[in-house]
Amino acid sequence: MTTVLGIESSCDETAAAIVRGDATAGCGEILSNIVFDQMDLHAAYGGVVPEIAARAHAEKLDVAVAQALGKAAVSLRDVDAIAVTTGPGLIGGLVAGIACAQGLSLGSGVPLVAVNHLEGHALTPRLTDGLAYPYLMLLVSGGHCLFLIVRGPGQHERIGTTIDDAPGEAFDKVAKLLDLGFPGGPRVEAIAKEGDPERFALPRPLMDRPGCDVSFSGLKTAVRLVRDDLVAKGGMTDGDIADLCAGFQAATRAVLVGKSKRAMAQFREVFPDIERTGFAIAGGVAANGSLRAGLETLAGQERFETVFPPLNLCTDNGAMIAWAGLERFAAGLHGDLVPKPRFPIASNPMHGVWTGKRGAKV
């Protein structure tokens, strides 16, 4: 059995965890999982402020590590490896986490393993459910939206991605448009339960085009235009806001469910002999109940086994980094300890508008 300390500081959660397990068998044991969120620090700004996030990480990383070790009842010298997120993410947070991990390694002699934050999410179903390779993955969060074929650590084939806003980002921006507060996702979901999803004719972007790529910027803009029209006609009522939230959530769900069906078909083309396999959904937006229900129904129809990590492992955490580090350590993949704000997870190249001026996003 291998024991790994995982450190995560890519955005607005400062996290450390101890995980023990066998990479060959899959399914590990989380001995501790400490997470300090920064919601109160960023709420007044309606989004994450990078400088504030970096300072908060620097203040909390050593506390998170100490608590993780204490709760797991292990010392640093009992750990086989230290895994740390090196990207993608906010540069200040990544630097803080890497510096912390390097200091711990120098003091203890424990080897370091660099982990792609997205791979942490992608391998979480291995940690929680022992899901066998290969499987289909929908990684859906505030900063990312990816359809992946997961074959093993460091072996991920992208079959779809977002060309603009990620779903979680769109949820937060819609919440800001409607003055609902931060974080936006849970607030939009709660208010949507009281609304009529069919009142406003909101678009389903890219559903008229082939492939698994998604887009949410136009949907967000459509919400803004409806809002502006309502305001111009006398203002928005609570009912208007609930209907807008319900319509936006329904459109997002329709796109992700529709694209997931296409991704499942592509997976079957690659692995025609696999009768039944896993469809894993991870990332913060995977906590949305409406989306979970839609994807679960689809998976049953398409003969996929749906795997949702526990809600506390959908959002950023140290346990997912520790497990990804454990699998990479077992495979001899130590990685490069350089902070990478953009850090593609997929092994297949990305072309076109998705690449951007600064390189590939995901």
Image: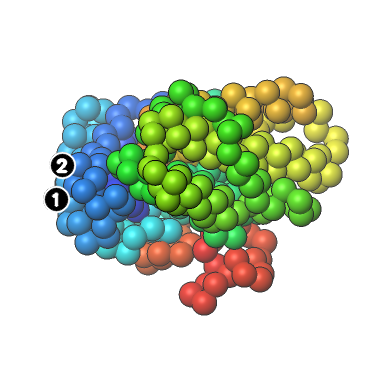
- Secondary element under disc 2, as helix, strand or loop, is helix
- Name the residue at 26% across, 28% down: 72
In this view, the mark in front (1 or 2)? 1
Quarter containing the N terminus: top left
The crowd level at tag 2 (other Cα within 10 Å; few <14, some 14-19, many 20+) is some
* Left or right relative to 211: residue 330: left
From the image, tell me which residue sits under label 2.
63
Q: x%, y% of residue 333?
A: 50, 55
From the image, tell me which residue sits under label 1.
59
Quarter containing the C terminus: bottom right
Q: x%, y% of residue 35?
A: 27, 37
Which residue is more in the foreground, 131 or 278?
278
Q: Is residue 119 visible in the rendered structure shown here?
A: no
Amino acid, disc 2: Val
Which residue is more in the foreground, 352 or 237?
237
Does residue 344 sit above or below 32 in this rendering? Answer: below
